[in-house]
Each structure stands twice: as structure tokens, then as C-alpha cells.
Amino acid sequence: DVVLTQSPLSLPVTLGQPASISCRSSQGLVHSDGNIYLNWFQQRPGQSPRRLIYKISNRDSGVPDRFSGSGSGTDFTLKISRVEADDVGVYYCMQGTHWPRTFGQGTKLEIK
Amino acid sequence: EVQLVESGGGLVQPGGSLRLSCVVSGFTFGSHYMAWIRRAPGKGPEWLAHIRPDGSEAYYVDSVKGRFTISRDNAKNSLFLQMNSLRADDTAIYSCARDVGRTADYWGQGTLVTVSS
């Protein structure tokens, strides 16, 4: 199975400051169709996960442009340009290229 | 508005069974792959299974293969997960999700399954 390793696991951030989460894959994520199915999810306290980013860098509808995704090969990053109070929660990366589809262990973002 | 509402969770003894249901609205259910994903305490989510739009084929992660069965009733906009031979490590919140583009773009809130004697 593909193992996704996120870092850091805990991310205290001051309001208005940037934040960055890394997701490293144990193997390449290029699908035979040429796409890289690497996604990011946000899980706010008490809620189910919400997809933010799909195929590395495509923002879902309604996701603020403060969120951006990047990466290639086996290294991917989610960046928040200016953290707001509403961003508190756990962030997961997930790959859909290989079966079984797998998630990272999560990064908990909190306000410092 | 897309809505996915799960039910059927609860407390069950090891070795027991449960059947989870998910009722969907806000999109054409019969046109989409659907999935079950669980979140165990302190762990990342685990994608358990997904099923083709017509229900003809399903795919399972090894940890539940042979014990869990995903199915659907397109006439009732409903997705199901039959869980047998439950173990303590199956304790989790189980969510149904719409599977689009090899990812889950909408999730339900989930239903809690606790396996304990």
C-alpha cells in the first residue's frame, strides 16, 4: 500500500501568518492516464472531512484562494497564505492513484 | 444541495454484524460511484470500499475483504454496508461518500460503530 507521511503532525500558527503542510508518498502517484490523484481535505472539529484540493492543485468550489496545493513526484504541499480562525482542524492528504486509496495520518492546525 | 445521511451504527459485540445505510439527495445517485470511508480514533481515514454506479462491481481494502459487503439501491438513492465478523479494530465513524475522479468530493457526517463486549 502507498504510505503518505505528513509533516508536521501538529502546526501551531499565529493568525494572519502562513502555514505549510508536507505530504510525502512512499511511491510515485502518476496514474496510467497521466494524472496525479493527490488530494487535500480539511476536517473541522465535529465535522466530516471536506475536500479542498484535488489533483495536486485544483481548488474545490467555495475554497478560499488562501489555500493552494503544489508538488510533484512524491512530495506535495498544502499552503495557507494567511491563517484565519476558521482554518482550525485536521488536514489530510489522500492519494487515489493506487489501490487501495490511502490517507495521511493528519496534521492538526491550531491557533497559537 | 448535496446531502448524504448515514444510519445504522451502534454498539455490537465482537463477531457480530451491522448493516449501515446511507440515503443521498441533491445529485443523480445512479450516475456516480459511491464509497464507504471510516475514521478510527487517532488515525487517518481509511477508504474501505467503493461500488460502480450500476452496482455491478465493487472494490475492497484487504482489511475488510470477505467480511464487509457494499451494495446500493439506485431506485431508493441508497448505499449500504453489510459488516460481518466485526472486531474491536473496526470501531470507527463510518461515512458514505461520493466517489468522483478517484476521490471523495462529498462526505456524510458519519455513523459511529463501536465493537466491544
Image: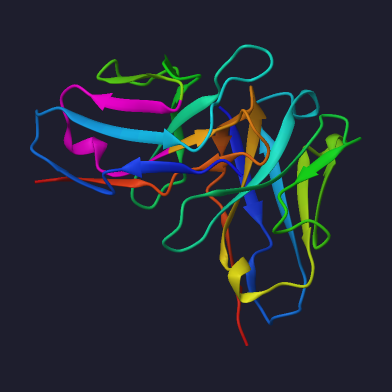
Question: Was residue A91 drawn as part of the magenta stretch in this picture?
Answer: yes
Q: In this view, does A38 lie above or below B89?
A: above
Give the percent coordinates (x, y) of residue A111. Answer: 14, 44
Q: Is residue B82 above or below residue B13?
A: above
Nearer to us in this view, A90 or B61:
B61
Which residue is farthest bottom?
B117
Quarter of the picture holding the N terminus of chain A? top right
Question: Was residue A40 drawn as part of the magenta stretch in this picture?
Answer: no
Query: Residue shown at 73%/58% (left/top)?
Result: B64
Corner quadrant of residue A104: top left
Which residue is farthest right?
B56
Which residue is farthest top?
A34
Give the percent coordinates (x, y) of residue A32. Answer: 69, 17
Give the percent coordinates (x, y) of residue B50. Answer: 74, 40
Give the percent coordinates (x, y) of residue A95. Answer: 54, 33
Q: What stretch is highlighted in magenta?
A: A74-92
Corner quadrant of residue B28: top right
* Image-based side of A7 in relation to B91, left or right: left
Q: Which colour scheme is used?
A: rainbow
* Image-based side of A71 in relation to A8, left or right: right
Query: Residue shown at 68%/82% (left/top)?
Result: B13
Q: In this view, does A92 lie above or below B6?
A: above
Nearer to us in this view, A19 or A62:
A19
Query: Residue shown at 50%/26% (left/top)?
Result: A38
Q: Is residue A24 above or below residue A54?
A: below
Corner quadrant of residue B92: bottom right
